Amino acid sequence: MTSLNTHALEASSAETLAPIFKASGDPLRLEILRVLRRDTFGVLELSQLFDMRQSGMSHHLKVMHKAGLLESQREGNAIFYRRPLHLDSVKLADQAIRQIFETVDRIPLPTELAEKIEAIRAQRAEQSQAFFSRHSAQFREQQELIAAFDLYADPTAELIRKRVSQQNWQSVLEIGPGEGGFLPVLSELFEHTVGLDNSKDMLAKATRTCIESRLNNVDLIEGVTDTILASGDAFDLIVANMVLHHVPSPADIFLDAAALMNNSGCFIISDLCSHDQDWAKENCGDLWLGFEPEELTAWAADAGLNAGEQLFIGLRNGFQIQVREFWKTTKRA
């Protein structure tokens, strides 16, 4: 390569990197990147977190988005921001962005900021709980506006049966069992089954399911994953059927699942792929309009889990369901 070509390449590289470092060269923007390590926040939420006007926050976010430091996603009428899902290991710009993230992540969150984040998550959780409290009598009908129970329960059950035949599993935790429709499957396959839900109304329905189906090896617990973590229990399998899009911080569920699983345990999820049908928020209590498969994979990797088998199911109404498995320590085919 001639010296002229080398100089041109260096100039091009500098021009590529300059906007990235310029966009990140601000303490507030670095704090925003830190906050978005695992979470996705809307413009209004970020304005609340950093006590600034929404217009000012929007300006910062647009600059960071243009530089490739953030990605936007539409959730109904609101715009949310997250870190990029796809960073190329070869591109110089993406290498720089990844290095910025790794450096920022070493900075501990200030206590006050962490408390504000928890407050926003609590607001989201209250929104979800309020919906299920109002519509518990129509739970199945509301959910089936998106997908009939069997469409995701059957392939999930088939995958679990396949894994049970290969493993010496004895205990399972289902996060968000709802009416308890999936508990008979788990009760049959496992010696000990636990159902965890933060809705009293849903737990009451799940209790009736257990009584009617004579499921004597099922314990139902009111609370969230922190409740189980505090008890010190561990499980061979954790299941979350169509739950993540109701959860205030989906990425944290992966961290909690990893902490709650025995070594070589598995976390199996069925949930919606990303979509733009925002009526689901009002009619089905959804907090999130589905997820990109890469989002789940990234959250799992961050929690030390390895992606395994995956299945995608297209529905006539335009929705798509993903059934995924994530393993602790050992990767499975």
Image (tube, helix red, strand yellow):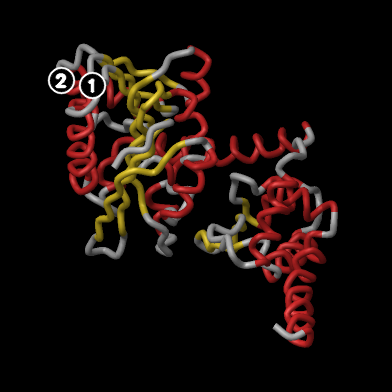
- Is 283 situated left or right of 48 in this image? left
Helix, strand or loop for disc 2: helix
From the viewer's side, name the closer residue of 67 and 76: 67
Which residue is pictured at 79% across the width and 35% down the height? Answer: 110
Crowding near the residue tagged with mark 2, few <14, some 14–19, many ≥20 C-alpha atoms within 10 Å:
few
User: Could you tell me how far apart the alpha carbons at marks 1 and 2 are, in whole angstroms?
Assistant: 6 Å
Residue 212 is marked as 2
Residue 185 in view in this figure: no
How many numbered marks does the figure carry? 2
- Is 268 situated left or right of 52 in this image? left
The location of residue 30, given as percent across then percent down, is 78, 52
The location of residue 70, given as percent across then percent down, is 65, 61
Relative height, residue 74 to residue 11 (above, below): above
Q: Amino acid at mark 2?
A: Glu
The location of residue 314, given as percent across then percent down, is 25, 60
1 and 2 marks in contact (CB < 8 Å): yes
Residue 118 is marked as none
Residue 208 is marked as 1
Residue 305 in view in this figure: yes
Relative height, residue 108 to residue 324 (above, below): above
Q: Amino acid at mark 1?
A: Arg
From the viewer's side, name the closer residue of 119 and 157: 157
Residue furthest right as drawn: 26
Relative height, residue 212 to residue 91 (above, below): above
Toward which corner of the image does residue 67 lie, by quadrant?
A: bottom right
The location of residue 9, given as percent across then percent down, is 73, 80
- Is 192 situated left or right of 74 in this image? left
